[in-house]
Image (cartoon, helix red, strand yellow):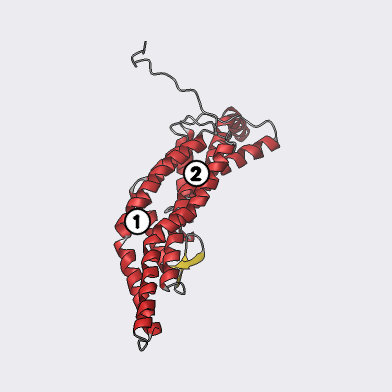
Amino acid sequence: MAEGLEVLNFGNFLVDNAASIWTFFLLSIRFFAMMMLLPGLNGGPQGRYVRTAGILMMAFASSTTSPNATLPPDLATMIVQGFSEALLGLAMGLLPALLIAGVVTGGQLSANTMGLGASQLIDPTLGQTSTSLGRVFGDLTAVLFLLMGGHYVVIKAVSGLGGTIIPGTFVFSEISSQLLIDRTGDIFRVGVMVSAPVIVALLLTQFVMGLVTKAVPSVNIFIVSFPLTIGIGLVLSALSLPELLVFVEREIVGVENSLLVLVEDTKTLPQVPDPGAPKTP
């Protein structure tokens, strides 16, 4: 008899708190999708246990301040709400990941230009090979992103900006789609900006070596050019690191504005005016 009452009480608890439980489930989907792509927090299979605990803790903390989601009347609406949260988390985690992809592309262009394209390293975050210089640039960008607190900005946006975003209401609009398209195109822009100093300097180096070959035909330019190109490329890459960090820092600041654009495609609670604030005439 006592066991039956406990089961009945548990069932009543689930029914009474169905909206809160469904909100927690949607927030877990959103954080899980974000953690799949967020730079610095998604790397390596050994971190899955830490990520799982972090996802559940952040979803629980966000559910205490988030407005409850609307209970779906049928299975189709339930799937749509879950898919909506997954899209929101993926989009917010993708924005900083695209920036790092652009920096890695710039490092790969520089490495290929100076003749280091054959030296490949395994990137554990992507599970693919990348050049050594691209890997170094990508890791430096990820570290700078974490040092600047970029992950805090993304997590705050994913959590609902202090409890104003209603879970399950994100819909891709034309503005959000155009934003992601532009950010994807920025991979090539960032790559060119990062690799431009090395590429231009090596083109001038090749031009000078061509003049040397014409002036002194006895010089074996093929033996001299390879180590000279690699040496000049590595030196210029090291000298350009301070400017690279300044450029990346400016790009990271722009990620916050992009996150706000995505938030505009969700239903938010109206802002409650502060009763203690002075009234404007």
Name which quarter of the figure residue 272 lies in.
Answer: top left
The residue closer to the viewer here, 80 or 107, is 107
The residue closer to the viewer here, 195 or 19, is 195
Q: Nearer the viewer, mark 2 or mark 1?
A: 1
Cβ atoms under marks 2 and 1 closer than 8 Å: no
**Above-or-below relation of 164 to 56:** above
For image coordinates 41% across by 56% down, the residue present is 193
Residue 244: which disc?
1
Q: Amino acid at mark 1?
A: Leu
Q: Residues within 10 Å of mark 2 (few under 14, many from 20)?
A: many
The residue positioned farthest toward the bottom in the image shown: 218
Q: Amino acid at mark 2?
A: Met
**Above-or-below relation of 214 to 136:** below
**Above-or-below relation of 197 to 219:** above
Q: Position of residue 47 (x, y in %)?
A: 45, 57
Q: Residues within 10 Å of mark 1 (few under 14, many from 20)?
A: many
Residue 92: which disc?
2
The quadrant of the image that shows the C terminus is: top left
Q: Secondary structure at mark 1?
A: helix
The quadrant of the image that shows the N terminus is: top right
- Residue 195 visible at all: yes
